[in-house]
Image (cartoon, rainbow, N blue to C red):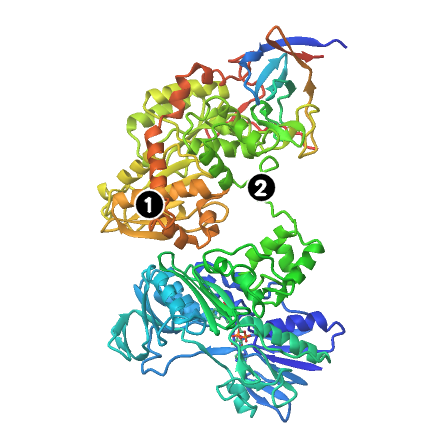
Amino acid sequence: MTVVWTPVCRFADLLAERGVAALIGDAQVAVFRLHDDRLRAIGNRDPVSGAHVLSRGVVGSRGDRAVVASPMHKQAYDLDTGECLDADARVPVFPIRVRGGVVEVGTA
Amino acid sequence: MRLVVVGNGMVGQRLIEALAARDTDGRWSVTVLAEEHRRAYDRVRLSAYFEGATAEDLTLAPAGVPSGTDIRLGEPVLAVDRAARVVRTAAGSYPYDALVLATGSFPFVPPAPGRDARGCFVYRTLDDLEALREYANGRSDGIVVGGGLLGLEAANALRLLGLRTSVVEFAPHLMPMQLDPAGGAMLRRRIEELDIAVHTGTGVTAIATDGDRLRVDTAGELALEADLVVFAAGVRPRDDLARTAGLAVAERGGILVDSSLRTNDPAVFAIGECAAVEGRCYGLVAPGYAMADVVVDRLLGGAAAFGGADTSTKLKLLGVDVASFGRTAGALDVVYADPANGLYAKLALTDDAGTLLGGILVGDATAYGALRAAVGGPVPGKLADFLSAGAPDVALPGHAQVCSCNNVTKDAVLAAIGDGCGDVPAVKACTRAGTTCGSCVPLLKSLLAEAGVAQSTALCEHFAYTRQELFDLVRVRGIRTFSALVAGYGTGRGCDICKPTVASILASLGNGHILDGEQAALQDTNDHFLANIQRDGTYSVVPRIPGGEITPERLIVIGEVARDFGLYTKITGGQRIDLLGARVEQLPDIWRRLVAAGFESGHAYGKALRTVKSCVGSTWCRYGVQDSVGLAVALELRYRGLRAPHKIKSAVSGCARECAEARSKDFGIIATEQGWNLYLGGNGGFRPRHADLFLSDVDTDTLVRTVDRFLMYYIRTADRLQRTAAWIEGLDGGLDHLRAVIVDDRLGLCADLDAAMARHVAAHTDEWRDVLEDPVKLRRFVSFVNAPSTPDPSISVGRERGQPVPLRLPAVRR
Ligand SMILES: Cc1cc2nc3c(=O)[nH]c(=O)nc-3n(C[C@H](O)[C@H](O)[C@H](O)COP(=O)(O)OP(=O)(O)OC[C@H]3O[C@@H](n4cnc5c(N)ncnc54)[C@H](O)[C@@H]3O)c2cc1C
């Protein structure tokens, strides 16, 4: 399968340790810039509440994993694997890169 | 075999529990005959009743009756027929093979004429306290006869009931049984500072009724007047049943028993306060428990004996620590007195200063544990360290008694910790230490800490500090960013607990707009979008309506905005209007309209001041005595935007009818003819609590100054998400401590707190107006970074009772 890269914003538009939501086709993606400028993208839908809000959670760490806490009920999601650390749930993970100062998210 | 126990007080209860635990093959069937109508309760903590504890809270038998035990409440024993081995009550006769008398004491009331007049009370049972509370309602002053331990507890109770209180003590100084004259004098100073009048060296000679009032004459010049009198002048053993049964009693009263707790009839035992063991009575619970354990052993064929008891005491009376242990006078007494700080300490030593015999501590009893354990040996450290405030770091020896109520040693506590007890409740359950008076709980905590069991007060995995410690770090070191704080004092990159906490601390200390720079990333979603997230991911908008007062024009604007943006509207409990269902990208447009009409942020999204409710007050109401709306508006504007450990609510009522429900608020104000009454520490919610009266009849300036300090002190010292009620309860000394800090300025903090509030008031700007004027912040209010004005397609709206409502989202869980 080939990955399709969609530009979503400029890297400079992103705030460290904060997310934004992007709309790619029908998919809602939560895009995060970490404190050391690495980027991560996961599904924006909070599987516990069903609301599309993960991009609005607080970003931080649990042990040595980078996580975002759902703003709804605070479950933490591993930004590398999409695994929920506090409930039996998982969100999709998307490839993400920067090309010429522009952030691109990969979808299949 | 049949055991009959007379009395279901603290010691009688201990007996049946210990027997049930040890009599595993059921040798004894037990009948308990009890005069009181309730199961045994914690008499030591009786006064907690006036701090809100209920009879259930005080019960000693939460789990019910041990099996094989028959308890008959409200059925006092009237006679003992020793020849027939039967006890009689009004309802019947109970044969026994062994009889245990655990009848306790009765309150001593001096033989003054008029002592049983209406308005005279004693202080021994829950029924006594209930009657006292009922009678005190609506009355203004009371006299306590007795300035010992019990009398001072009763004085505190009267104070909590809102009565002006005086204490009359026969001895020349307070607490004559425990303290020497100098210690008593120090205690007196501290107590007089609480506006309690103290009269020593005089006894009550007569009480006369004058209408609804009582006149109390004393041996001296003094004649006092009050609404009620409480006798708390000591106790006498209840030995009448034993006397009429022909059992031996001690010279000064008490059922005479030997060290096996047997009376002169080998089938009859006496334990607790009613017993005179080898002629000596004990008015404390710990010796009583030891007696109960001895009798259980004897009943099961053992040979245990009562070897006397430690009558050391450590208490907090009216917020003052008082302790005495061992002998309070020796060949050599070393004394430290610091009247300015209300501290007094005395150590009694042998003449070569080599051996500690006992001592007295007033004002600060931290050294009590270490010192009491050292009695009989050398002073464990430098003498001077013990005498000045605080306890030096010394290790307690293993045999040192940690809990005197239940006779638990340090070794026993350490063994329990070794067996896996990881916190105070576990240690309590396992050893019984700390389950009676609770004064050793701090010691249990430090033993846990010493044993390396972390009593985590850490905020989260990223900071090993409490919120208060972080607040002080940030304030004292002048730290201005989370990154600097976590790099210097924490680990990792933070989480949804510590980041908003630090954001709140930074905001409380005045670091500009909450969305400036790195702070924006710390806020949870509500603060980040200055609105409250709802179940479908939309937000609610709540403009400030100070005091609930609003013009028709502004009401119309709110209606128009709601209509134009398709929002659901609802009146809140805080006298304002909630607009629900706003999408992120709509928020700036909605606020542009609201700000243009003169509205500003209501901070409904923040851990901050919410509203100051009010009734219409003297402006309109024919009962109102002050302008409650005016004050409410002024207070809401003064404290708007103030970030705190939790939300803060307030209300102002214009008269005593209290239509604004001020007593359910963190700070509530009720108008009086003379000014204002201030109540602190109330809340509704999960555990409703009424606020306590803090100031009466003060003018507006005093009121505002006090609220300023209250809020700032709360912000500096409370835990994360701790409302003011829990915070006050957790302060060592509670409301008295708060008064000492923010009224009497004992810690010298007031100028600092005042300045901090002045900075807050001066720095106020409207958070929403600031966002609208700042393109950088405004850019964050978009639905999608690559499609800024496309609404989230997953949000769908239905209608209910003529308004838009969210359609339920399909949640997939598990
Ligand atoms: C306000 C207050 C504060 C106190 N603070 C402390 C403290 O800080 N530390 C401390 O160590 N101690 C304290 N004490 C003392 C402590 O409460 C007593 O030492 C303890 O309760 C004694 O237990 P007891 O079982 O001997 O007596 P009680 O607890 O008084 O129980 C005796 C019971 O026997 C019943 N009874 C009497 N006669 C009969 C009869 N003929 N038939 C049936 N039942 C009968 C009584 O009704 C009563 O219920 C305090 C006491 C009070 C009142």
Work out how far the residue at label 1 is from the one at label 2, CA to CA, in angstroms: 31 Å
Q: Nearer the viewer, residue B612 or B538?
A: B612
Q: Callout 1, which amino acid? A: Thr
Is residue B201 rendered to the left or right of residue B129?
left
Which disc is residue B458 wearing? Answer: 2
Q: Secondary structure at mark 1?
A: helix
Q: Nearer the viewer, residue A95 or B512?
A: B512
- Cβ atoms at labels 1 and 2 below 8 Å apart: no
Q: Chain of mark 2?
A: B
x and y percent of residue B775 in the render?
44, 14
**Residue drawn 43% across and 76% down?**
B234
On screen, B285 above or below B95?
above
B604 and B571: which is toward the camera: B604
Q: Is residue B532 visible?
A: no
Left or right of residue B647: residue B300: right
The kind of residue on which mark 2 rests is: Ala
Q: Quadrant of the C terminus of chain B?
A: top right
Where is residue B751? Give x, y as percent: 33, 41
Q: As displayed, is residue B606 above or below residue B160?
A: above
Residue that lies at the very extreme toward the front in this rendered image: B352
Label 2 C-beta lies within 8 Å of the nearest ligand 1 atom: no
Disc 1 packing (10 Å; few <14; some 14–19; many ≥20): many
Residue B320 image position (x, y, % from top left)? 42, 60
Q: Nearer the viewer, residue B675 or B582?
A: B675
Would you say A54 lies left or right of B679 here?
right
The residue at which mark 1 appears reads as B706
